[in-house]
Amino acid sequence: MGIGSHKNGVTDAGERGKLRAELDGIIAHLYGLTESEFSHILGTFPIVDEAVKAAALAEFRRLG
Protein backbone atom coordinates (compact mmCIF):
# COMPACT_ATOMS: atom_id res chain seq x y z
CA MET A 1 0.00 0.00 0.00
CA GLY A 2 3.00 2.27 0.14
CA ILE A 3 2.73 3.35 3.77
CA GLY A 4 5.96 1.61 4.78
CA SER A 5 4.82 0.69 8.29
CA HIS A 6 1.66 0.11 10.26
CA LYS A 7 2.70 3.19 12.26
CA ASN A 8 2.09 5.35 9.18
CA GLY A 9 -1.54 4.29 8.77
CA VAL A 10 -4.60 6.49 9.10
CA THR A 11 -5.42 7.08 12.75
CA ASP A 12 -8.26 9.60 12.46
CA ALA A 13 -11.55 7.77 13.06
CA GLY A 14 -13.44 9.76 10.42
CA GLU A 15 -10.82 9.15 7.75
CA ARG A 16 -10.64 5.46 8.67
CA GLY A 17 -14.41 5.24 8.24
CA LYS A 18 -14.22 6.82 4.79
CA LEU A 19 -11.50 4.41 3.73
CA ARG A 20 -13.43 1.44 5.09
CA ALA A 21 -16.56 2.47 3.18
CA GLU A 22 -14.53 2.85 0.00
CA LEU A 23 -12.94 -0.57 0.46
CA ASP A 24 -16.30 -2.19 1.16
CA GLY A 25 -17.73 -0.66 -2.01
CA ILE A 26 -14.75 -1.77 -4.09
CA ILE A 27 -14.90 -5.30 -2.71
CA ALA A 28 -18.64 -5.55 -3.43
CA HIS A 29 -17.92 -4.58 -7.04
CA LEU A 30 -15.08 -7.09 -7.28
CA TYR A 31 -17.47 -9.82 -6.17
CA GLY A 32 -19.89 -8.68 -8.87
CA LEU A 33 -22.69 -7.86 -6.44
CA THR A 34 -25.71 -5.87 -7.47
CA GLU A 35 -26.81 -2.94 -5.33
CA SER A 36 -29.69 -5.03 -4.02
CA GLU A 37 -27.39 -7.89 -3.06
CA PHE A 38 -24.91 -5.59 -1.36
CA SER A 39 -27.69 -3.82 0.51
CA HIS A 40 -29.04 -7.18 1.68
CA ILE A 41 -25.60 -8.26 2.90
CA LEU A 42 -25.11 -4.99 4.78
CA GLY A 43 -28.46 -5.57 6.44
CA THR A 44 -27.27 -8.86 7.92
CA PHE A 45 -24.84 -7.11 10.28
CA PRO A 46 -27.05 -5.93 13.17
CA ILE A 47 -24.27 -4.49 15.32
CA VAL A 48 -22.80 -2.34 12.53
CA ASP A 49 -24.02 1.24 12.81
CA GLU A 50 -26.50 2.30 10.11
CA ALA A 51 -24.28 5.26 9.17
CA VAL A 52 -21.44 2.84 8.37
CA LYS A 53 -23.73 0.76 6.18
CA ALA A 54 -25.06 3.86 4.41
CA ALA A 55 -21.52 5.08 3.72
CA ALA A 56 -20.54 1.72 2.22
CA LEU A 57 -23.63 1.67 0.01
CA ALA A 58 -23.00 5.27 -1.08
CA GLU A 59 -19.45 4.34 -2.10
CA PHE A 60 -20.76 1.32 -3.98
CA ARG A 61 -23.11 3.60 -5.91
CA ARG A 62 -20.36 6.17 -6.54
CA LEU A 63 -18.10 3.51 -7.97
CA GLY A 64 -20.90 1.93 -10.01
Image (cartoon, helix red, strand yellow):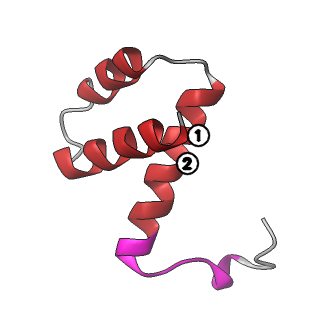
In this rendering, position of residue 41 left or right of residue 1: left
The number of callouts visible is 2
Q: Residue at x 43, y 51 (%)?
A: 21
Give the residue pinned by disc 1.
26
User: Which amino acid, mark 2?
Assistant: Leu
In this rendering, position of residue 6 left or right of residue 43: right
Most common SS among magenta residues:
helix
Q: Quadrant of the N terminus?
A: bottom right
Q: How crowded is mark 2: few (under 14 residues within 10 Å), some or many (20 or more)?
A: some
Q: Answer with the quarter of the image where residue 18 lies.
A: bottom left
Question: CB of mark 1 within 8 Å of CB of mark 2?
Answer: yes
Image position of 1 with respect to 23: above or below: below
Give the residue pinned by disc 2.
23
Is 7 a magenta residue? Answer: yes
In this rendering, position of residue 6 left or right of residue 20: right
Which span is picked out in magenta?
A: 6-15
Q: Between residues 45 and 32, which one lies in front from this camera angle?
A: 32
